[in-house]
Image: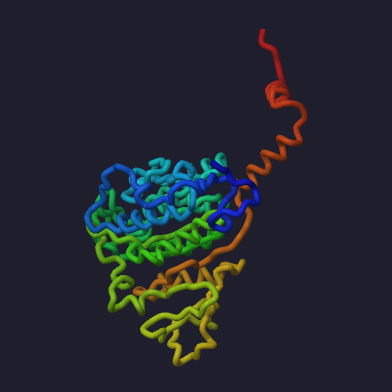
Amino acid sequence: MTTTELGTELPFPGMRSGIELVPTNDQPQTGKEYTSDQEVRWCPGCGDYAVLKAVQGFLPELGLRRENIVFVSGIGCSSRFPYYLDTYGMHSIHGRAPSIATGIATAREDLSVWVVTGDGDALSIGGNHLIHALRRNVNMTILLFNNRIYGLTKGQYSPTSEVGKVTKSTPMGSLDHPFNPVSLALGAEGSFVARTIDSDRKHLTSVLSAAAAHRGTSFVEIYQNCPIFNDGAFDAIKNNDTKADAIIPLVHGEPIRFGVEGAKGLIRDTETGGVKVATVADVGEAALLVHNAHSPDPSTAFAISRLTDSGYLNQSPIGIFRQVERPTYDDQARAQIHSARDAAPGTPQDRLAALIGGGDTWTVV
């Protein structure tokens, strides 16, 4: 049994040090080893099944022991995730999963910490917890399942439901302007922000790999279909007849091009300062925007994320929007603790006695 030390190369670049690796003389892990004995209880056809299968198949690639992986969830259909994985996990309280995960990641640097949440759980009661986890850049990976509806409570509109959405709680149509989760994460200074689709196993796995490799908070929005209460919400990007024009793939270092035979692309919008869709034949290939996920300035990534909500109703950028390095909260917190401990004189017992007896004291008689 071996434990990594500071500076030791880990299976994914950037993975926090201190995580105990699977011994090289052990048999390779498989997805079956990460599958618990619990009955999976989601509605038939739910997109959660596809995500669960992808995660179970992906986790062995991390090269970690199962006891060094923790999944924390909030409340909602997706929050049953920890029951179905043979790792450590916690089904926590509504909206607070990022806060609980922050404590785990800060206290235990040897753990790979994951948060599973939904659009209602994360963006309604949990909105404040989510944005602070992102700005702090804690070492965790947040998977936000977005089906644009409240599924567990039977079909009320959610913070990502479109304006005019008719539901049990909005019989005359929703008046709320929806959140764009990717825009929100970028605005909160997220250091890794991505979007993928439940039904695209290859793309989903590649994004999860990059998210797990990132040091800091990785935020991944997953478009996930709810066949009971919001079926067909993502038909435009899933239908074989329309998805070529609906999906805008983002690949770092490559021109942003999409459509049948790459006929469309993104260019700078000189009037607004943002980006817009153009026909390649009209503007020329040289005018196409080259995606730079590593730019320290998130302005362009934010502009690209707005395409989902700015009149392009049947188009959506998919991929890694932003991937940059900056100091993490938990690493810095541990460094402060070590610094204070090393600077304090005496034994731990002496320091405890000084703490208890220090400052203003009095005797009760």
Measuring from the top left, give residue 174's x and y in whole percent. 31, 61
Q: Is residue 174 visible?
A: yes
The residue sitting at 29% across, 63% down in the picture is: 165
User: Which residue is more in the foreground, 222 or 212?
Assistant: 212
Q: Is residue 347 left or right of residue 226?
A: right
Measuring from the top left, give residue 262's x and y in whole percent. 41, 84
Q: Quadrant of the C terminus?
A: top right
User: Vertically, is 93 above or below 314?
Assistant: above
User: Which residue is more in the foreground, 143 or 57?
Assistant: 57
User: Vertically, is 360 above or below 130?
Assistant: above
User: Which residue is more in the foreground, 243 or 201?
Assistant: 201
Q: Quadrant of the N terminus?
A: top right
The residue sitting at 41% across, 48% down in the picture is: 125
Q: Is residue 196 left or right of residue 171?
A: right
Measuring from the top left, give residue 319's x and y in whole percent. 45, 68
User: Which residue is more in the foreground, 210 or 232?
Assistant: 210
The residue sitting at 58% across, 63% down in the picture is: 324
Measuring from the top left, give residue 234's x and y in whole percent. 31, 67
Residue lying furthest top: 365
Q: Is residue 81 visible?
A: no
Q: Is residue 168 left or right of residue 244?
A: left
